[in-house]
Amino acid sequence: MGLGIESRKQIARRAALEIGQGMTVNLGIGIPTLVADFIPSELGVMLHTENGILGMGPSPEEGKEDGNLSNAGGYPVTVIPGASYFDSATAFGIIRRGLLDITILGALEVSEKGDIANWIVPGKRVPGMGGAIDLAQKAKKVIVLMNHTDKEGNPKIVKECKLPLTVKEGAHMIITERAVIDCADGKLMLREVMYPYTVEEVVASTGAPLTISENIKVFQ
Amino acid sequence: MERNQSALNKQISIDEAMKHFRDGMTLMIGGFGGVGAPPTLINAILEKGIKDIHMISNDTGFPWIGPGKLITEKRVSRLIASHIGSNPEAGKQMQAGELEVEFVPQGTLVEKMRAGGMGLGGILVDVGLGTVVEKGKEKVFIAEKEYMIEPSLTADVSIVYAQKADVYGNLIYDKSARNTNPLVAMAGNITIAEVEEIVPAGSLDPECVITPGVYVDYIVQSKGVDWKWVWELNQESK
């Protein structure tokens, strides 16, 4: 079952709290794209795109779109003061050089150790990895936004990923409609539950052991 | 095929440009999700009936956009790309065994193109270690760090889309439509640039040139984008 828009926004709003002053950030397609709406402009955050923009701004008003100014998903965007355009090799040089503070992306599975699988379901959906491997391997902090469970209700947070990996031990944080979980030292720490879920519900729908934080909070 | 040595005026007609295309060729195409892909040249390739193309492109656009059209019309037999997710037709042909696909992480793919254009044999890269990307790759250690050797990429012909060119072929792109175009332009054995506006030599500020004209063999006048973007179709269906 897909998430409703309110759940998606709640996840995006929580993810935005991880973004600090002056950071360089890449947002993936799907829920990560929504994060942009919750970043306060006074933070001076520069959004990076794989096609070659640093300083991406919000979507333009209808009628003001420019076919030659789009995000990596092909949708029209704007730029903010201080923005620059460059070729895609430079866009990925920025990533490999370690200049991205945060990348926020979706996933199919995340393991206890922070392994991420997000680009292929062999024999079923084979879209290609795009820039996901570069981003997940090289950003200073990798935040995964996803549904807590799949369409059949099976946990997407698992002991071992079954799908081919995007990155080994790459995730630092997982945010779902049920929980905020830190990945560190090969373990998962439940830091927050998302309203209205309970700790018990989160644990029951997670396929890997969770350490419960001593000062666990509820995110509204 | 020899590079065009005429520095005076590299503009040719679309028909003349088409003499450089043949079945079974390796064709590198600029653009990202179809943005910055050369529409007029892609249409001409379709019209001329070129097939069995070995295509190198960041992605396969959408079924009706950019390089996606060549996939939809089944003109491509082999593809090197980072992503085909926005073109279900590409996935279908791959599953049916009609289209051979080699996936390369995006940053590695564009750097392999750049290396081709820079006259390098390849690059050393660690992106994808610990994943299926590693499979079959030759490896080296530099300062105790592990890297894969990724050979550079070149093509029989590269086609790109630029906003402006002078007659020597110096290119300027438009915003995020620059994307892979400068890299693709450098990697062609023959490079043909489709251009919105062609101006006399001396009209471009040398400081603003993105691709030096020496990489560009021919320029053709663009007839402009003739497809609808996904967001335009979404607006229309509202």
Image (tube, coloured by chain):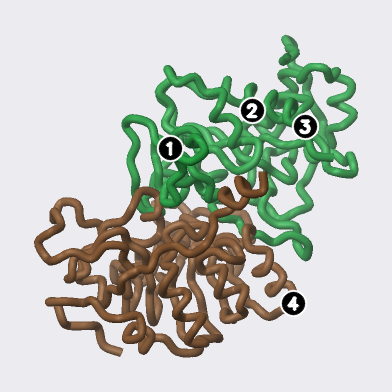
Lower position in the chain sequence, tag 2 or tag 3: 3
Label 2 vs label 3: CA separation? Answer: 12 Å
> Considering the numbered disc 1 on the image, is that residue within a helix, a strand or a loop?
strand
Are discs 2 and 3 less than 8 Å apart at CB?
Answer: no
Q: Tell me the green chain.
A: A
Q: Residues within 10 Å of mark 3 (few under 14, many from 20)?
A: few
Residue ID for mark 2: A12
Relative to A209, is B175 above or below?
below
A132 or B184, nearer to the observer? B184
| Distance from Cα at disc 4 to Cα at disc 1 | 40 Å
* Labelled disc at residue A4: 3
Chain letter for the residue marked with disc 2 in the picture: A
The image quarter in which residue A159 lies: top right
Q: CA distance from mark 2 to mark 4?
A: 38 Å
Looking at the image, is mark 1 or mark 3 earlier in the sequence?
3
Residue type indicated by callout 1: Thr
Relative to A30, is B56 on the left or the right? left
Compute the Cα span from label 1 to label 3: 27 Å
How far across and how far down the image is residue B165, in percent?
Answer: 23, 64
